[in-house]
């Protein structure tokens, strides 16, 4: 347990990514080294277009790097993320990664409660159904459980997204400018929830942000500069 | 630049564009093919009567009409008593046997009647000669002046006709007239556009103040055979329009989807100073271009299909059917209507999203319900009224789709089950604007399939029962009259169970009626559903005769000076003309001189073989063979119907495909989110399936009640009005389930299959 706590959940070396669109090629990432230990938080900063989202998507296994090596440790195993098959990545992402996006975090045709329950249902059947309701109550959203996302405010939507990402207590939580669209009050609330969860349940948090105050709360920081 | 942007857009959404073109082309194909086939059949029907009769609209009948009565009528007409009558002429029109040929003798006032089309006045014409068609010319020992197209008709001057019939010079059959109709021209154009339309016009009695002694019959009433044929054509044409209607939904769907994706581009152009009218018209013009392409493809496909259908229906192959201006007008007219109408409507709806028309919708629905009931209840609205009811019912169900989807959306939270299924299923109702039209189109196509299927199935069941009742003799003998006469003579000596049928023609209230004479014993009468025997003063009438002559069982009526009582009314499925059945003892029996066929209650195989040798000219047909043939003919009749419905279903399937493609645009973000949550591609397919099932459920939910209503209208309203017989609606599961199955399959395929890679991720450049 102790050895695992010290092992990095995410470990990347020399990561590079280039997008090609016809004849044009945009090199977004080059030679990025990164390491996030279990239970620690990392802030990704940098201006718009510097590749924060791209890096998060690499960690989530949604895309693969052109160069470098990336390891993801979950379930007591170290997975070679850069060599894993699509199928394998999908399986691991479903079970071990929570992801909060900047917007469009909720499935519009599912109610708030159903959205939060979804990761549970995808992995362990209805065993976490009750837990989903607890999380909503904890986040002050229990009265919105039966509503559809379109009637929720931006702040409420993001809190639901955080609740959903935490349902499975995954070892890795990714957040891509989760407060980008929120006012200061709501923003603080969401950031509190994310960092609080990381501290309490030993989840590793990687958060992309523009905000200095948000970045300052993280244990570590990676500036993609430009 | 705008043109380039639009062009690039069309190319980029290649598959939905191609699908739209294919859909419209299929719609056009169904219209074109049916038009070509029906126009051909209509011209064959018209050829049955000499062209000289084409201008005549009504006929005046009186029992034993004399020339004096005609001249009296004519004198009053000259004095202006009947201002609406444009033309009046006496006619001899009687069946006769001349030189062993059964013919129809038509006598017209060729000298004074103004029948200019006949080559009567030229030097070669002999006033004592006749006009016949070419096949008849060689078989008659008459002086033939020239040829006409109508088969088995001997056309002559009145005097000649009277001599041929052996009639006195002052006896006439009836008086033919042309009565002014203010909308005759409209009707003529209508007939060109929709062959058979004439049968759909409600029958209006012209305002002519005649004595009670005259009975006025319209050309349709006088000539039920052509009326019958036209009704078939009208039914087919109406059904063929379904393809276009569903194509309209499809193009509207495409227009909506494109507009959504194109709108940002158009707005950018608008900001740059391009007028909105220009933008909208370029958009509509793009659709028009597609429609024209689809029109060309559809016309070619339609011509090909027409030839194939014609070969199927008539057994004649390689018929060269003409594509005329009317067909092209209809092909491109419907394609353009579909494109311009659908496009403008989509633009209008888009710019008008703020206002709701709930009250207007309900008001419209109320009016439509009223029209539906009027068309069904009021027999005077004729075939057109019945089809109006079907059309209004379709519009009502279209109007209902959207509110229904919205209503379901408000209750979407109730749906429980596996979350991925739930989320897919709910997508059906989540974007009512995207799916309404496609759901309505599929619903309509399936409903028509159910309605027609129920009708055909019920009809077949009735027909089957009818055959069982009628085919009670083991063997029926047919062949040349003399051979039949000889056979009946020989046979009558040694077998009492031989039935000899004689046939003749007679007018009942002016309507040409087939007279059938037989020994109406208990066994024979049972074939017409009658219990007991017929006497010398009772008759049986077919459903059609009962209708045209307004007769019911128990009524008494007089024909040719003989008064009879109607003992019963029997169904006459497939009868073209009204029928009157009498016993040999009835005074009218002497009017039927020709042996038509002979039926034998019992005849074993050996006997049949011997008879076949003894009477080589006769055909001995077993009842089972007759039954099979009758059913085969029945099924063949509905081949075209089946094909038209299949086309409509195909177009509707394409509509769902296009709608689903545009819906995927809405779901792109959700799909990405699901992927980031680790939902696999097979699970995504499951979501697609769930949504497609939801779509199918909505469409079929509409189709089921609508289809049953259609079936009822077809059986109980359209059949009696068009053909004069009623079909009992039988609600068997097969004709309902089969179209539902096809609809489900179409919706599932359209919802899951995708052509091209990620077409939906591309937006206008
Ligand atoms: N799928 C893609 N195809 C092509 N270019 C992309 C794609 N995704 C991102 N980019 C480009 O990569 C760069 C980095 O994007 P992103 O990772 O979203 O940066 P950030 O999140 O820091 O704003 C941007 O220039 C963006 O245009
Ligand atoms: Mg980003």
Image: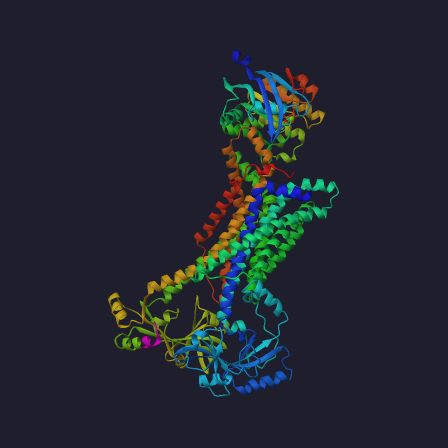
| Quadrant the N terminus of chain B occupies | top right
- Which residue is the extreme one toward the front? B123
What stretch of residues is rendered in magenta? B479-485
Can see residue B416?
no
Instruction: Give the prevailing secondary structure in the magenta stretch.
Output: helix
Q: Residue at x 52, y 48 (%)?
A: B700
Instruction: Give the left or right position of residue B630, taking residue B90 as reference.
Output: left
- Rendered view: B269 above or below A143: below
| Quadrant the C terminus of chain B occupies | top right
Q: Residue at x 65, y 29 (%)?
A: A156
- Rendered view: A27 above or below B34: above
Q: Nearer the viewer, residue B495 or A114?
A: B495
Q: Coloured how?
A: rainbow
Q: Residue at x 46, y 71 (%)?
A: B577
Task: Check residue B480 for magenta coloring.
Answer: yes
Q: Nearer the viewer, residue B353 or B59?
A: B59
Q: State the image coordinates of residue B668 (x, y, percent, origin top left).
A: 59, 35
Instruction: Give the left or right position of residue B716, taking residue B626 as reference.
Output: right
- Rendered view: B70 above or below B277: below
Task: Check residue B145 for magenta coloring.
Answer: no
Q: State the image coordinates of residue B462 (x, y, percent, origin top left).
A: 42, 62
Q: State the image coordinates of residue B624 (x, y, percent, origin top left).
A: 33, 63
Counting the numbered discs, the total is 0
Instruction: Give the left or right position of residue B583, taking residue A219 as reference.
Output: left
- Rendered view: B274 above or below A121: below
Q: State the image coordinates of residue B233 (x, y, percent, origin top left).
A: 51, 63
Name the image quarter holding residue B377.
bottom right
Can see residue B283?
yes
Ligand 1's quadrant: top right
Q: Nearer the viewer, residue B660 or B324?
A: B324
């Amino acid at each position: 347990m102790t050895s695992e706590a010290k092992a990095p959940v995410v470990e990347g070396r020399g990561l590079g990514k280039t997008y090609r669109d016809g004849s044009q090629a945009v090199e977004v990432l080059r030679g990025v080294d990164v390491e996030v230990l279990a239970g620690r938080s990392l802030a990704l900063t940098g201006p718009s277009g510097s590749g924060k989202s791209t890096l998060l998507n690499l960690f989530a296994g949604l895309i693969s790097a052109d160069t470098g090596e990336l390891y993801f440790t979950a379930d007591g195993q170290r997975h070679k993320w850069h060599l894993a098959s699509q199928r394998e990545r999908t399986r691991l992402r479903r079970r071990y990664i929570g992801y909060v996006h900047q917007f469009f975090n909720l499935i519009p045709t599912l109610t708030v409660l159903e959205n939060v329950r979804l990761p549970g249902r995808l992995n362990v059947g209805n065993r976490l159904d009750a837990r989903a309701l607890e999380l909503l109550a904890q986040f002050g959203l229990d009265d919105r459980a039966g509503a559809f996302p379109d009637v929720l405010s931006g702040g409420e939507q993001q809190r639901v997204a955080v609740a959903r990402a935490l349902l499975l207590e995954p070892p890795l939580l990714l957040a891509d400018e989760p407060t980008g669209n929120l006012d200061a009050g709501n923003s603080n609330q969401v950031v509190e929830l994310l960092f609080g969860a990381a501290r309490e349940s030993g989840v590793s948090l990687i958060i992309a942000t523009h905000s200095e105050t948000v970045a300052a709360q993280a244990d570590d920081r990676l500036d993609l500069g430009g | 630049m705008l043109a380039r942007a639009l062009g690039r857009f069309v190319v980029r959404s290649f598959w939905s564009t191609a699908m739209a073109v294919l859909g419209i082309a299929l719609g056009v194909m169904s219209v074109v093919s049916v038009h070509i086939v029906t126009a051909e059949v209509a011209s064959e029907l018209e050829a049955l009567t000499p062209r000289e009769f084409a201008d005549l609209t009504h006929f005046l009948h009186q029992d034993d009409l004399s020339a004096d009565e005609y001249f009296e009528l004519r004198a009053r007409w000259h004095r202006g008593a009947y201002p609406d009558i444009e033309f009046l002429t006496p006619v001899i029109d009687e069946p006769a046997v001349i030189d062993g040929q059964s013919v129809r003798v038509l006598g017209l006032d060729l000298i004074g009647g103004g029948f200019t089309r006949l080559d009567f006045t030229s030097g070669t014409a002999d006033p004592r000669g006749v006009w016949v068609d070419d096949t008849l010319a060689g078989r008659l020992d008459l002086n033939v002046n020239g040829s006409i197209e109508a088969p088995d008709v001997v056309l002559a001057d009145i005097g000649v006709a009277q001599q041929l019939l052996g009639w006195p010079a002052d006896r006439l059959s009836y008086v033919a007239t042309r009565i002014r109709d203010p909308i005759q021209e409209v009707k003529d154009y209508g007939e060109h556009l929709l062959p058979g339309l004439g049968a759909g016009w409600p029958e209006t009695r012209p305002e002519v103040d005649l004595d009670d002694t005259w009975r006025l019959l319209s050309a349709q009433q006088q000539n039920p055979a052509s009326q019958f044929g036209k009704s078939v054509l009208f039914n087919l044409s109406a059904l063929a329009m379904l393809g276009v209607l569903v194509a309209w939904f499809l193009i509207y769907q495409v227009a909506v989807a494109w507009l959504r994706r194109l709108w940002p581009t158009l707005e950018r152009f608008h900001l740059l100073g391009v007028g909105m009218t220009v933008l909208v018209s370029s958009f509509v013009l793009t659709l028009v271009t597609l429609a024209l392409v689809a029109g060309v493809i559809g016309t070619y496909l339609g011509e090909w299909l027409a030839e194939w259908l014609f070969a199927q229906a008539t057994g004649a192959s390689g018929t060269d059917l003409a594509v005329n201006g009317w067909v092209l007008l209809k092909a491109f007219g419907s394609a353009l209507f579909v494109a311009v109408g659908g496009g403008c409507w989509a633009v209008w709806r888009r710019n008008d999203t703020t206002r709701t028309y709930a009250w207007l919708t309900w008001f419209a629905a109320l009016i439509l319900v009223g029209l539906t009931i009027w068309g069904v209840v009021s027999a005077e609205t004729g075939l057109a009224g019945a089809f109006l009811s079907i059309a209004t019912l379709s519009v009502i169900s279209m109007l209902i789709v959207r509110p229904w989807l919205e209503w379901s959306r408000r209750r979407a939270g109730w749906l429980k089950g596996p979350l991925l299924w739930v989320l897919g299923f709910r997508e059906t109702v989540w974007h009512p604007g995207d799916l309404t039209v496609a759901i309505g189109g599929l619903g309509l196509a399936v409903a028509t399939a159910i309605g027609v299927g129920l009708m055909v199935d019920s009809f077949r069941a009735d027909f089957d029962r009818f055959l069982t009742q009628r085919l009670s003799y083991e063997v029926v003998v047919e062949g040349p009259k003399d051979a039949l006469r000889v056979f009946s003579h020989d046979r009558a000596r040694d077998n009492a169970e031989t039935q000899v049928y004689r046939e003749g023609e007679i007018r009942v209230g002016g309507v040409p009626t087939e007279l059938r004479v037989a020994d109406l014993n208990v066994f024979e009468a049972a074939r017409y559903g009658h219990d007991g025997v017929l006497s010398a003063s009772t008759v049986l009438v077919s459903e059609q005769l009962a209708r045209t002559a307004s007769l019911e069982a128990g009524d008494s009526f007089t024909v040719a000076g003989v008064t009879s009582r109607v003992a019963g009314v029997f169904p006459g499925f497939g009868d073209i003309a009204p029928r009157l059945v009498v016993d040999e003892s009835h005074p009218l029996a002497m009017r039927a001189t020709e042996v038509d066929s002979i039926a034998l209650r019992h005849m074993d195989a050996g006997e049949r073989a011997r008879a076949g040798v003894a009477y080589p000219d006769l055909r001995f047909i077993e009842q089972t063979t007759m039954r099979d043939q009758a059913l085969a003919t029945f099924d063949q009749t509905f081949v075209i119907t089946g094909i038209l419905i299949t086309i409509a279903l195909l177009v509707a399937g394409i509509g769902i495909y296009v709608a689903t493609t545009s819906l995927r645009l809405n779901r792109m973000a959700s799909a990405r989110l699901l992927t980031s949550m680790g939902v696999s591609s097979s699970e995504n397919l499951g979501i697609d399936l769930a949504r497609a099932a939801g779509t199918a459920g909505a469409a079929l939910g509409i189709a089921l009640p609508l289809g049953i209503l259609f079936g009822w209208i077809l059986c109980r309203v359209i059949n009696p009005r068009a053909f004069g017989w009623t079909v009992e609606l039988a609600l068997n599961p097969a004709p309902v389930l089969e179209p539902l199955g096809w609809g489900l399959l179409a919706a599932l395929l359209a919802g899951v299959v995708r052509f091209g890679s990620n077409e939906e991720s591309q937006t206008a450049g």
